[in-house]
Structures are given as structure tokens and as C-alpha cells.
Image (cartoon, rainbow, N blue to C red):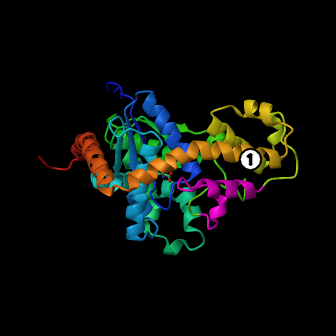
Amino acid sequence: MTEVVHTPRVFSGIQPSGGLTLGNYLGAIKRFVEMQADGIESIYCMVDLHAITVWQDPDKLRHATRELCAGYIAAGLDPAKSILFNQSQVAEHVQLSWIFNCVARMGWMNRMTQFKDKAGKNRENASVGLFSYPTLMAADILVYHATHVPVGEDQKQHLELTRDIATKFNHDFGTDFFPITEPVIEGAATRVMSLRDGTKKMSKSDPSDMSRINMTDDADAIAQKIRKAKTDPDALPSEAGGLEGRAEAQNLINIYAALAEMSVEDVLGEVGGKQFSAFKPMLVDLAVARLSPISAEMDRLMQDEAEIDAILADGSERARAIAAPILKKTYEIVGMVGA
Ligand code: TRP
């Protein structure tokens, strides 16, 4: 068998459920923009089909999909360079996910910790979609033969499953058709935690709005949330080691470093010894300076829904042009008769 060399292609996705947070921006979108700048072919998806694995109000889903698209663009993704589209409009994702449902084993799926977390105690009442979510995610990636997938630490297990599915498919059908995708896992430094509890991820689904900074928050809201953010009574350390066991301090310093594009060491070199009462206003100024141009641009883009819809339609068409031949070939390999 000849070794197929897959050209680098980036794919990632974010769920349009609720608004965009600082966590999505620093943890994901900012890195997508950097990858776009590196000139690698990149595909960024709004995974609306994943969002409905838990109930979504249809009007809110439409709004969140467009707002996510506006957020991608406002943060620096260029729809002419990267392919931006919403998942439901390229049917090949779902078609390939069915094939993968027949490749993945129940035992693999039963180990998925995200399902256990999301389904909670009432597993009998979770949707079948929530359970099979990871095979759709594998299809999102592999229907483009994506080689690199930037995601947060919490998605690592799903990417390992994607590799297992590709490996088993290739083995079962005696082919090397699907690439074994490289995860590009973000380090802890880009993981943004809740402002109320430094051990929990900042999340759009947290009941407390004070726990997160939304990309649509105005300067007053950002200032209020940072001022009220949980801290400890000690001064900031001068070295990174001093942040150990101080989850909230670590989080605020990480946020500062990511927004300023500085290392944690350099930030602590400047602010070590300061009390939070002195550091927080610096963080407010920086956050407002970095985020308000993005939220203003999101606002502007959201004024023109037709324009956003046209960008998504164009992205879907370009995505389908890549996905359709890969799905066709997959069907052939599996033994589906067709033209
Ligand atoms: N499951 C991812 C998350 O919740 C979102 C996602 C869906 C995704 N499909 C993907 C990420 C494909 C990367 C690649 O964050």
C-alpha cells in the first residue's frame, strides 16, 4: 500500500449556543486567526447540528449562529481566506457521521466523559444525538481530510476517538483513505476560567453572567465583572511558581498575558508585588481596549443579516466542494452502489 501524504488543512468548530465569551476568543478564535495568518488552508464551522443535541430555541439558534459568524470575522477571520460556514448546510457531515456510527464501537462511546458530564444523572433522558455527538465531530473533521484540529483540552478525548475511527475504517476496508488527525491542544495558558471559580471553565452555559465576559459586553459590564471577580487576599507573586494553588490569581494573570500577548513571566515581572486592587484596573483597561473594537465590529456586522447569510452560503458552497468528493469516495470504499 502506498503511503498517502495529506496536505495540511485546519478544521475547527464552535457551537452556536448562547453568546461568545472571552474563553471562546482567547482559547479558540484568536488561534484560528493566527493559523489563517500562517497561510494554511483553514475551515471554521458553526456547528449548529451539535448545538441541538440539547434543546435550542430556534430563533435564538439563528441569532447565535449569525453572531458567531460575526464574532469570527470581527476577531480577524477573513471569509475570503478561511472558509466560514454553518454545519447544517453541508449535508456530507451527517452522511459521513452515519458511516462512522457503524465504525465506532459502543464501548468507545461509553467512555466519553463529555457525554457523562452533560447527561448528568438523568442519562435515560439525554438525547441520542448527545450520545452520538462525537461521531458527528469525527465526520466534521474527516469529511475534509483535515490534518490539524485546534481545540481546547476538553475535546482531547473526542479527537482521540476521531483517530480511532479513522484507524479502524482504514483497517476494516484495507485503505489509508482517512488521515490520522493531529490534535493541536491549547495549553492551560489559553484556557480561560470562570471569574467566580478559577477551577471551572468560563462557560456560556454558567447560570451566573458574572462568571464570564461576553464578547458583546460593553466597557461598563467588563469593568464591573473584573472588579467583582473572585480573588484571594495576597499580593501577586513575581514568579509563575507563586501562582500555584491560586486558581483565581492564575486565571486573571493568564487573561492579562493572553490579551497583552505577553508571557506570564513578563506580566509578573511588571505586576509582581501589587495587590489585586491595583492590578484589576490595569486588567479592565486592557480588556476594554482589546475587546471593544471587536464588539463594535460584531454590532456593525449584525446590522446586516443578509450579508452574514451570504457569507455563510458562500462558505458552505466552498466547503461542499471539498467534502462531496471525499464522501463519494467513502461510499465507494464501503460498497454503496451509485453513479
Ligand atoms: N465539540 C467541540 C466543542 O464543543 C465543537 C466541535 C464540533 C468541533 N465539531 C468539531 C471542534 C470539529 C473541532 C472540530 O468545543
Q: Would you name the residue on which mark 1 appears?
A: 281
Which is nearer the eye, 127 or 303?
303
> Residue 102's quadrant in the figure?
bottom left
Other residues around mark 1 within 10 Å, as few (<14) / some (14–19) / many (≥20): some
What residue is rendered at 84% in x and 53% in y?
Answer: 232
Q: Total label count?
A: 1
At mark 1, the secondary structure is helix
Give me the residue at 61% from left, 55% from top.
Answer: 213
Q: Quarter of the image holding residue 225? A: bottom right
Q: Which residues are magenta?
A: 206-230
Q: From the top left corner, tell me how far across and down residue 164 is, in percent.
A: 46, 44
Relative side of 123 to 146, left or right: right
Which quarter of the figure is the N terminus placed in?
top left
Query: In the rendered image, is residue 105 in sight?
Result: no
Residue 159 forms part of the magenta stretch: no
- Identify which residue, 74 or 68, lies in the foreground: 74
Rendering coords of residue 150 (x, y %): 50, 40
